[in-house]
Amino acid sequence: MAYEEPITDYDYIVENCTCAFCGCNCDDLVYLVKGGNVKGELEDNVVVSGYVDGGHVVGVRHACRLGASKVMEDMDQRLLVPMIRDAEGNLVETDWDTALDKAAELIAGSVRPVFYGWSETSIETMKFGLELGELVGAVLDNQATICHGPSLQAVQNAGYPVMTLGECKNRADMIVYTGNNAMNSHPRHLARYSTFPRGFFRKRGRFDRTVVTMDPRYTDTAKMSDIWVGFEQNGDYEFYNAMRAVLRGKKLQKDVISGIPKEDIEELVESMKQAQFGALFFGLGLTHTLSKQRNIDIAINLIQDLNKFSKWNLIPMRGHFNVNGFNIFMAYEQGFPYGVDFARGYPRYMNGETNTIDLLTREEPDVFMVIAADPGAHFPSGANRHLANIPVIQIDIHWGPSTELADIVLPGSFIAVEAGGTSYRMDGVPIYMKKAISKPETCRDDEWIVNELLKRVQKIKGIAPREASK
Amino acid sequence: MKKITLNQKKTSTIGLEFDELIPDNVYTWEKADFEKYQVPIGNSKFPFTDYFDVEVEGSAEAPNEVIITINGDLRRVKYIGTKMTAGEIIANSSVDLHCGSEMAGGSITVNGDAESYAGREMTGGTLTIKGSTREFCGSSYIGDWRGMTGGQIIIDGSAGKQLGECLTGGEIHVKGNCDILAGIHMTKGLIQIDGDVTRWPGGQMQGGNILIKGKLSRLLEGFVDAEVVTNPEIAGKTFTGRYIKYTGDIARNGKGNLYLDADKNRNFLGNY
Amino acid sequence: MVEYILKNGIVFDPTNNIKGEKKDVAFSNGKIVEDVSSDAKVIDVTDKLVMAAGVDPHSHIAGPKLVVGRLYRPEDSRKGIVPAKGVTRSETGFSVPSCPATGYRYSRMGYGTVVEAAMPPLEAKHTHEEIMTIPNIDVPALPLFGNNWFVLEYARDGKVDELAAFVAKWLKLVKGYGIKIVNPCGGEAWGWGMNVHGVDDPAPYWDVTAREVVRTLAKVNEKLGLPHSIHLHPNDLGHPGNDLTTLESMKMVSDIKKSSGVRNQNLHMTHIQYHSYSGTNWRDFKSGAEGVAKYINSNDHVTCDVGQITLDETTTMTADGPMEFDLHQLNGLKWANKDIELETASGIVPFIYSGRNSVHSVQWAIGLELFLGIKNPWQVMLTTDSPNAGPFIRYPRVISWLMSNKRRMEMIENREVHKAVEKKSSLATLDREYGFDEIATISRAGPAKAYGFTDRGHLGVGANADIAVYDLEPNNIDPSVEHEQIEKAFGNALYTIKNGQTLVKDGEVVAIKQSQNIWTNVQGLEAEEAAVMKEVMPVFNKYYTIKFENYKVHDHFVSNPIEVKVQAGKASK
């Protein structure tokens, strides 16, 4: 990594901004803004309320490289105007009314609409999306379906012993990362929440904590851990089962379990029992190996067992900054976290039946709306094949593989930079992400776009807007 | 006796939902009633007779006097026999998700394969699958710790992952092979597998019995106290042969039993 | 401006001493008025039961705990599914209903105000988001203070003034209504997997006891003159022998003078059923209701709500984290826990209360014993600590039990409850039956008074037109015999009127109204608050994981709130 000169060429500072990248939702970012006029109050060069109209973020303090590179503008990839794919298959620029009417028409006429994404937009946008979904009988699903969905299924089977990240920061003397490489995926997780910060009861920070990484790979996180447990791939379930058995006082029969010598397992379990406060963070490495949700299931049970001896909690390392938000939002609005099917006029939640990937590989959907997500980049080819065959409406800020699949493109705005909105951190702490600068003139807020679609579909269906539904 | 025959006219890529077409509802129906019926497909309902020709013969006083035969390609027909309490359904094809889920009585015969969730949360009756089935056969609804509580599922082919998850009663008999984690979290009931099993049957089981006549690839550490038993009697049935009997999953203080054919699984005997 | 008049109902309005008079209730512009013109719209309710809309003093309906319950119990969500119909959206859930379902169901029972009893300040935004999503009822929320690090420290050092400023500031920040205390010091001990026992067991490290925390917060509460008293979930919930802790918890604040012109109490004891257990273990466990009721009968500084067991499969959820873990050890069902940094703990476990189980049956009896043993109905309130002891939709059933000794004896004799009820409680000897007046007191007038509400809970002129009409003819029914009809009628209001708008008719929700949040704005301590924040901020910045700017509840999360302004140190009226 080459040395970069600090940024000095900026006009305004906006403090306490929230990072719209991973589930850490770091809310201590400082945006350095160049140009524009402040709509709000200014003290020295710090914007204390309001935002900078027409400004550009030229630098970000405190953020990790992932966050900073997302926040800093990359206008060359930015979607700026609505587009509709023409008969030749080219995306052609159009005006908002035409694009929205066309999209509304598709949604209103659809028999199996799927609205997928939501994890990178605000709760306020989801409100309108859900109302639209309930109105037309759509399936609403988010990225959990391809990432922490199995974790949620396990939570539903086994329980959910969680904490806020500050509990870990202030109390934890043992940190376990399993099936994830936080150093690369959530770069500030260790620095801001778990390992390095000086907590109330852990005044020396890193020196007061033991860090364990359980991962088949020797990752960057493993490299800075005190203990690395490199169990064999797909051996997770057996490994955790053995730990639970040891915790119950059983002598292990096999000498090596899932590639780990039994003495090591016994020693590890003993040190976990001795911890004053333990925190386990698990990632997709655990959710997506052979026994899927059952790995999490047994890990949760292990945490429950450990609480008989000491204090342990866990947190799933959620990927997108509002992937947890969608699950929480759907649960309080309609009782189920993701993959909710409103086709029959009431919510149905059935993994394997009402999830996006299953629906797409079964070739059921006839209209697909993707908002703040990139199925083109993330979905299996079978699912994307079907997307290529049906009308796809995209609401997003950047050009990506999904744009290539889209038939209607509606350019949104960047939550936490150009638009405010609520998000939920991986531990469920809600944060209002504030607006720092204005959006490009030709774009619209996600909230506005989805509300506009709702109004237009209501008009097509001849339905009055719902009273006090917001 | 009333015989209702449904012959498929056209298929739909979006699944048809057959939850309303169970003997409990249709025993009074005549052909005209089917012609009026709108079947749920996606977020809409469509005339049933666009998709099926209906023949009705005889009459019935109660659901148990009904036999429904469904012919055609039913790979996009979901919820066949869901919540039925009596009568008979014969599907002459492979069927889609949730066949026989929550059924309480009567019988369903699938002359083909069944998709996932067959017999989920059954409380009674018999579900016979002549082909194979996929995941979560005889399981619980997600989140519930009480799965299938009664009845019988017979699978002539093989079964997918997490067969009989949270089994709380009843019997599942797989004549073919079985994928990972059969009987996970089960508390009561019997799972019999005649073929081979991949990994980890009985994970976190608390009670009940699993009997495997084929070869097992990997067993969890939570299964202990192995002993060899001959011709064991389980749930009122005698199984001939020599079996290694384990107790588990002690990782969860379980008191279930896992029987492994001793001759096919000699490698496991080596540990003791 | 449309005027309305409810004609010829049988009105029970304990606040205004109206006990079953046949009279009209007039309202216009959302308020009860003396009289209306002849143009008024007439709603004929001849001989039907008319009360103010219900006020629930303690329920868990919105917030992070609830959402964990919904998220991890899809099997519960699936139970209460009702398709969308007319103005209503689809409903889900039995013990942890979705937000729309919560509003509809309370509305159908004739309720207009429900207190959300536990709001962790850090996640207050979440609670308020849910309150905004719940239609048809007004919702004040009580922030949790009993295990907050700042509170522990101020209480240990006896700094009442500083703590008063802190509480005043925090109520503003999180838009809270009053002070909730849950297992004081026990929640903090749970941070290390421990608990405290009794009121004199200090929290690890902080070296402060529940006695000190509760007393200091009670002083603070009265110093600020908050509309509600401290709202205490005392230590040792659900432990045999906790009746002694409960008695001590009440006694220890008896000397603190209340400073409110509306309420009588300086302490509200919540779900007191869970705290009235005598014995030393689950084998010799028996009812301690008599002693607890006796104290309340001879001391008017306490009010309580019961937390009546309804014998259902439900979801227990409380900020009492260690208690939930014990419960999980007991029943082995899936355990959720949520510790909140610097503030509180919480836990959730599904629970199946069954009449076949001796302990559950005795718990059921203890609740009823308290209802029947506490003489003054203004001191006892109807709750099931929803969803802990049972979902709130069971209130009508609890009412039917209270009004019918015959039904209670039937349950005991038919073995709908375990025979232990006769041995371990005195329920079978209590033949008191509640009248409609007492029902109106425990379900609306009493809670409203205890919360310092003057605009609701009664039908006097000037009050909000929050009215419930039930399909019962009080002069023409024997509740003792016709208990089934009582249950049905209280569950399906003939009319529920909120701020003058008819929301329910014939048990069906016919209109949707945006809910309002009620919060307390303490005035006059601005300088003290600023001084305290100078002490708080360095700690806040160091140990919270969120920036102060992003901590507070922005106006964005409270649409159309009802702000209760209180002058610090002056009794509210």
Image (spheres, rainbow, N blue to C red):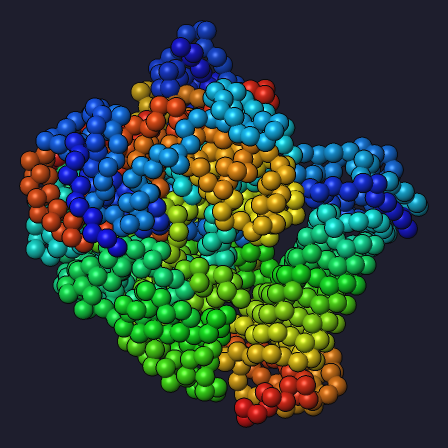
Seen in the picture, residue B160 relative to A55 is either above or below; the reply is below
Query: Horizontal and vertical percent for residue A250?
Result: 43, 84
Q: Is residue C68 visible?
A: yes
Along the line of sight, which residue is nearer the eye, C314 or A111? A111
In front here: C189 or A157? A157
Q: Indicate the quadrant containing the N terminus of chain A: top left, top right, bottom left or bottom right.
A: bottom left
Residue at image location 44% in from the left, 37% down from the top: A399
Specify the farthest residue to the right: B58
Residue drawn at point x = 37 percent, y = 74 percent: A229
Report which quarter residue C170 is drawn in. Answer: top left
In this picture, is A76 found above or below C335? above
Above or below, C217 relative to C500: below
Front residue of this view, candidates A5 and C272: A5
Q: Quadrant for residue C26, please give it.
A: top left
- In this rendering, would A250 be left or right of B92? left
Q: Residue shown at 47%/21% (left/top)?
A: A96
Q: Quadrant of the C terminus of chain A?
A: top left
Residue A124 x, y percent position in the rendering:
39, 34
Q: Quadrant of residue C564?
A: top left
Q: Which of the pair A353/B245 is nearer the observer?
A: A353
Residue at x 83% of width, y 44% of height: B8
Q: Position of residue B209 (x, y in %)?
A: 63, 76
Res. A470 in view: no
